[in-house]
Amino acid sequence: MAILDRFSVAGRSALVTGGASGLGLAYVEAMAEGGAAVTLSDIDLAGAEREAQRLRDAGYDVRAVALDVSDSDAVARVFDDHAKAFGGLDICFANAGIDTGAGFWNPEGHRNPDGQVDTYDPKRWDKSIAVNLSGMFYTISNAVRIMKQPGRANGRTGGAIIATASNAGLVTEPIVGLPYMPAKAGILHMVRALGLELAEFGIRINAIAPGPFVTNIGGGWLKKDPTVRAAWDAIVPLGSVAETEQMKPLALMLASDASDYMTGAHVVIDGGMMLGRFK
């Protein structure tokens, strides 16, 4: 097989959670542009339908569904519907995630009175864990359930699961809410454990640990405030915060046969932030 052919996802089907914006939308676009049929799921159905229609208008095979990943029954239904529509599942981006409020430090350099451990609202904690960690488990477990089913339409076995973690699961990020960090750390360890469990079934699972990308996480400060954006650009060793478009090549690699000897791994993509915050 020619080397560039190994990056192809043509003829495969993919399901992306949290796909209506941010990194999730970049994953959807990467899969669609690579030739896969895609289910774009998101709690924001209007946003999902808008983006799916935009991509269909461009000639891609993308369908939109509503999904709250913290609802285990809803997750199972969405995966069953995908498998019925496409004869199975080849690729899953377990991506949906939220930040339920600022951490103890805000981007302007001040402490947040409601972001510290002794003042943190337990309801915010519960919601973050329900979406970011439990929702990840529901997503992955259903992807595996479908990928293990025999007799898939395209004759393929196994599959590729890519989980969106964060470098906030590897180092402290005081501007994000407290539960976001242990949830993302839990994802990384879940991926390591499942890499071993799923290998014999030909199911590969890997995680992406993004650094600073322009998304809605962290209250969307990088979109809203040019001063905050400039401050972050100044400390990224490669010179700037990333746009979501820059995630697509890595997403395509992990979803395709280009990474067929990778499982249980995490890939940091952060412009060098974890190497030290000094340029």
Image (spheres, rainbow, N blue to C red):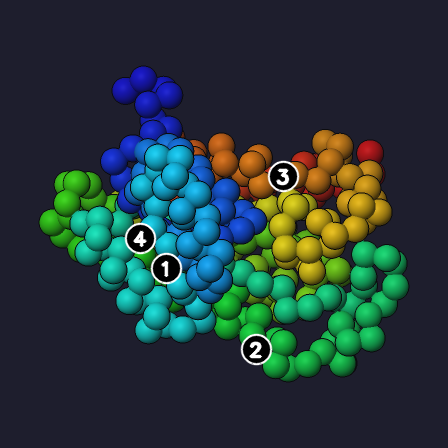
Mark 3 nearby-residue class (10 Å; few <14, some 14–19, many ≥20): some
Number of residues whose C-alpha sits closer than 10 Å to that of mark 4, classed few (under 14), some (14–19) or many (20 or more): some
Type of amino acid at the residue the image marks with label 2: Asp
Nearer the observer, disc 3 or disc 2? 3
Q: Earlier in the sequence, mark 4 or mark 1?
A: 1
Q: Which of the pair 199/50 is nearer the observer?
A: 50
Distance from the alpha carbon under mark 4 to that under mark 2? 29 Å
Q: Nearer the viewer, mark 1 or mark 2?
A: 1
Residue at 37% x, 28% y is 7
Label 4 secondary element: helix
Mark 1 — residue? 65
The residue beneath circle 4 is 198
Q: Are marks 1 and 2 in contact (CB under 8 Å)?
A: no
Say the numbered circle drawn on residue 126.
Answer: 2
Tag 3: residue type? Glu
Residue in view at x 75 percent, y 60 percent: 175
The answer to which quarter of the image holds residue 99 is: bottom right
Mark 3 and mark 2 lie on one chain; the one further toward the N terminus is 2
Q: Is residue 100 visible from the viewing direction of this image? A: yes
SS at circle 2: helix
Q: Are marks 3 and 2 in contact (CB under 8 Å)?
A: no
Q: CA distance from mark 4 to mark 3?
A: 32 Å
On the rendered structure, is 223 left or right of 47? right
- Mark 4 near mark 2, Cβ–Cβ under 8 Å? no
Relative depth, front residue between 85 and 15: 85
Q: Which residue is mark 3?
A: 243
Of all residues, the one furthest to the left in this rendering is 151
Residue 124, image x and y in percent? 63, 76
Q: Distance between the Cα atoms at labels 1 and 2?
A: 25 Å
Mark 1 or 2, nearer chain start: 1
Residue 261: in sight, yes or no?
no
Q: Position of residue 106 (x, y in %)?
A: 81, 61
